Image (cartoon, rainbow, N blue to C red):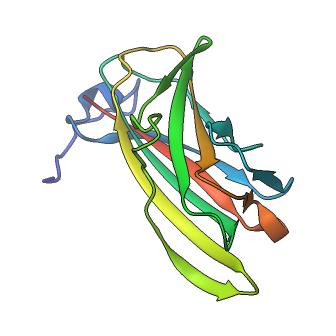
């Protein structure tokens, strides 16, 4: 995107003068403690990992960036992750991965020893909720078989969101 010079007199807000595609605000949630695990084959919240943001404009887009660290048993076939959007108690899967055959998962094995796979997964999403109400983005996780441990040995995970002017 080309740089745009803004004529700002020092009073009021320049947000309305920003061009479409400009990042208006960011928010982050980080999980540092409270290890969790699941053998669930349906999506569950990743404990203590979420982020909330209140949109400046109803037509804004949101870029959600999820980075998780977890360990899987050697017998765990697949770990699936998704992100849900919560607006006033109404939840929506923004990644479209709630069917058993889809996954938003991308990552790489970084260690394999003693039957445990240590994994870092990174996923990015674009959301267009069309609201000015506070939004809570919540990562969820499930497995196809076996167990997954997240926050294991205090491995950091984070979720970041950027509001992008529409």
Task: Count the labels in the image.
Answer: 0
Q: Residue at x 53, y 48 (%)?
A: 81
Name the residue nearer the viewer: 123 or 39: 39
In which image quadrant can residue 148 be found? bottom right
Name the residue nearer the viewer: 3 or 28: 28
On screen, residue 137 above or below 113: above
Give coordinates of residue 96: x percent, y percent.
39, 34
Outermost residue, bottom side: 113
Q: Residue at x 33, y 26 (%)?
A: 128
On screen, residue 118 above or below 130: below
74 relative position to 53: left or right: right
On screen, residue 21 above or below 2: above
Q: Residue at x 28, y 41 (%)?
A: 22
In which image quadrant can residue 46 be found? top right
3 relative position to 23: left or right: left
Q: Residue at x 67, y 74 (%)?
A: 74
Give coordinates of residue 166: x percent, y percent.
24, 28
Give coordinates of residue 97: x percent, y percent.
43, 39
Outermost residue, left side: 2
Give coordinates of residue 42: x percent, y percent.
62, 36
In which image quadrant can residue 99 be found? top left
């Amino acid at each position: 995107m080309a740089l745009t010079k803004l004529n700002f007199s020092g009073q009021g807000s320049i947000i309305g003068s920003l061009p479409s595609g400009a990042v208006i605000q960011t928010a982050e949630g980080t999980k540092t403690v409270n290890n969790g695990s699941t053998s669930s084959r349906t999506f569950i919240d990743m404990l203590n990992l979420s982020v909330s943001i209140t949109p400046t404009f109803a037509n804004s887009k949101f870029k959600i960036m999820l980075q998780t660290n977890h360990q899987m048993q050697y017998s765990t076939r697949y770990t699936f992750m998704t992100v849900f959007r919560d607006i006033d108690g109404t939840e929506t899967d923004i990644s479209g991965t709630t069917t058993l055959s889809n996954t938003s998962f991308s990552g790489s094995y970084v260690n394999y020893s003693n039957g445990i796979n240590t994994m870092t997964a990174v996923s990015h999403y674009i959301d267009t909720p069309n609201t000015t109400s506070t939004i809570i983005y919540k990562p969820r996780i499930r497995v196809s078989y076996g167990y997954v441990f997240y926050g294991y040995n205090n491995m950091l995970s984070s979720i970041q969101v950027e509001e992008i002017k529409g």
